[in-house]
Amino acid sequence: MSQTKPLIIDVHGHYTTAPKALEEWRNKQIAGIKDPSVSPKVSELKISDDELRESIETNQLAKMKERGSDITIFSPRASFMAHHIGDFNVSSTWAAICNELCYRVAQLFPDHFVPAAMLPQSPGVDPATCIPELVKCVEQYGNVGINLNPDPSGGHWTSPPLSDKAWYPIYEKMVEYDIPAMIHVSTSCNSCFHTTGAHYLNADTTALHAVPDQ
Ligand SMILES: [Zn+2]
């Protein structure tokens, strides 16, 4: 009698170990918001396949093997999304870079990583603007889910609740592609809420118990 080993899938993994060049590029991008002369070009970010491989093999993949899990749904580092920084264009460029890296990791380790996308959200900007990145990630990168930030302001909760029709264009695409969203905030820029100690914990409760405008 043969027994089939269950496939163990971790649905919540992030690329927290991306090569330092990513953070350095992001820091220049942030500096460029105030001083456009220092804004980096996308092409200035150079990360080789070998660097990607090493960052995964010695970290996430090593842990997966140690703990016996098979596949990780893999999205960009959540605290780095920082949707509150800059405008839609800043978020858009940043999301594209981070999603491409997760896609490349999935290409390098197709048996172990399947990508999920961050969205180019920005405070006060219509969520529908995220759709082109979502479409690209699903259709070209094979993403099987998205991370949806209910609070792109980073702890100030300036967006309408997730029950508001403003979010529907995203939900309609999720239905069309039959993909889930993980509700996931990012770094807090409100000192009342520590990022992981308070904001991450509060956000799920807040988002799922929001009351629509009366
Ligand atoms: Zn997470």
Image: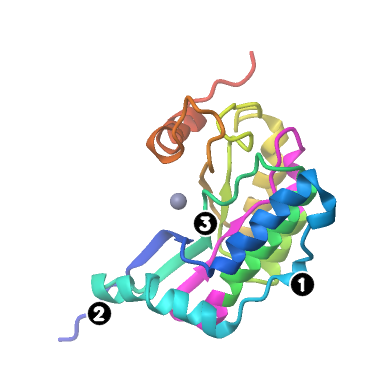
Marks 2 and 3, how far apart at CA: 33 Å
Instruction: Name the residue rendered at 65%, 39% in the picture.
Output: 84
Mark 2–mark 3 contact, CB under 8 Å?
no
Instruction: Name the residue rendered at 60%, 59% in the picture.
Output: 117
Q: Which residue is mark 3?
A: 77
* Quadrant of the image containing the C terminus: top right
Residue 43 circle label = 1
Q: Position of residue 167 (x, y in %)?
A: 68, 38
Q: Is residue 211 left or right of residue 88?
A: left
User: Toward the viewer: 53 or 124?
Assistant: 53
Counting residues from the start of the chain, the first of labels 3 and 1 encountered is: 1
User: Toward the viewer: 98 or 39?
Assistant: 39
Marks 3 and 1, how far apart at CA: 21 Å
Q: Is residue 21 left or right of residue 121?
A: left
Question: In the rendered structure, which segment of residues is drawn in magenta?
Answer: 105-131
* Quadrant of the image containing the N terminus: bottom left
Marks 1 and 2, how far apart at CA: 46 Å
Taking the view exactly as shown, the residue that stands out farthest to the top is: 214
Q: Position of residue 146 (x, y in %)?
A: 58, 54
Dot 3 alpha-carbon crowd within 10 angstroms: few under 14, some 14 to 19, many 20 or more:
some
Instruction: Name the residue rendered at 69%, 52% in the picture.
Output: 173
Q: Is residue 155 left or right of residue 45?
A: left
